[in-house]
């Protein structure tokens, strides 16, 4: 399994305290990427597309190079647009997804007494809800752009799950388990 995202993706609005893989937090980040990225790609692209992308990640050419590194395309409204690619440090939906999960998981700790939050001297704890919402919503925006890119190039990406199960459109309750819908819904701080 080739990993697309690495610790260098966590800059700008996805900054984390320590990304050096030779230090404990950086090693944990590397492990979280390795565990979250494949599942995310399988669920957003579909297993067949993921499997083919995985086989073509190292020596990517043609359509797989474009999915990884970006390409200009004509979107569903007939406008010129640009898909930045899964390897885009600034717009990677994978990096936003990993960042979201790390911030969510590290905000509190489970102890014998229950769920706790660390207190820090000379600082105030702040709820991470705004950072979580921003990261998730930027991931959603990037995924909608990727979906449009893949749909406009449907003859090249015939196994993309979004061609069979349109994101956010459910016609049958049984489709819920097979679609990538949950990744296409924005969130807010109120949970609505």
Image (spheres, rainbow, N blue to C red):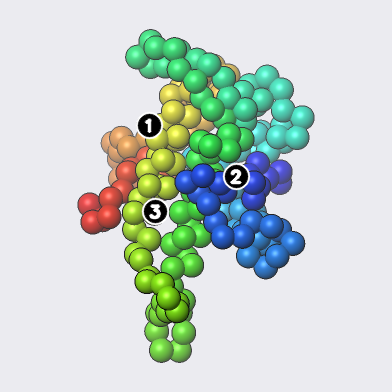
Front-most of residues 172 and 192: 192
Which of the two discs, 1 and 2, sits closer to the camera? 2
Are the residues at dot 1 and dot 2 in contact (C-beta closer than 8 Å)? no
Q: Earlier in the sequence, mark 1 or mark 2?
A: 2
Helix, strand, or loop for circle 2? helix
Residue hosting label 3? 131
- Answer above or below: position of 26 versus 151: below
- Answer above or below: position of 188 versus 104: above
Residue hosting label 2? 9
Tell me the number on the disc at residue 16.
none
- Image quarter of residue 35: bottom right
- Image quarter of residue 171: top left
- Mark 3–mark 2 Cα distance, whole angstroms, equals 16 Å
- Mark 1–mark 2 Cα distance, whole angstroms, equals 29 Å
Q: Earlier in the sequence, mark 3 or mark 1?
A: 3
Tell me the number on the disc at residue 166.
1
Q: Residue furthest front?
A: 122
Observer able to see residue 67: no
Residue located at (53% from left, 37% from top): 90
Are the residues at dot 3 and dot 2 in contact (C-beta closer than 8 Å)? no
* Residue 76 image position (x, y, % from top left): 38, 16
């Amino acid at each position: 399994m080739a990993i697309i995202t690495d610790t260098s993706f966590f800059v700008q609005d996805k900054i984390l305290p320590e990304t050096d893989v030779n230090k404990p937090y950086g090693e944990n980040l590397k492990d979280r990427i390795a565990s979250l990225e494949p599942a995310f790609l399988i669920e957003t692209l579909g297993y067949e597309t993921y499997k083919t992308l995985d086989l073509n990640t190292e020596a990517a050419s043609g359509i797989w190079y474009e999915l990884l590194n970006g390409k200009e395309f004509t979107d569903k409204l007939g406008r010129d647009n640009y898909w930045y690619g899964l390897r885009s440090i600034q717009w990677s939906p994978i990096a936003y997804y990993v960042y979201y999960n790390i911030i969510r998981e590290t905000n509190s700790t489970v102890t014998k007494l229950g769920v706790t939050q660390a207190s820090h001297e000379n600082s105030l704890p702040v709820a991470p809800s705004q950072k979580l919402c921003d990261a998730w919503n930027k991931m959603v925006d990037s995924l909608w752009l990727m979906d449009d890119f893949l749909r406009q190039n449907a003859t090249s990406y015939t196994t993309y799950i979004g061609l069979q199960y349109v994101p956010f459109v459910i016609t049958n309750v049984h489709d819920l388990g097979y679609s990538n819908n949950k990744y296409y819904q924005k969130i807010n701080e109120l949970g609505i």
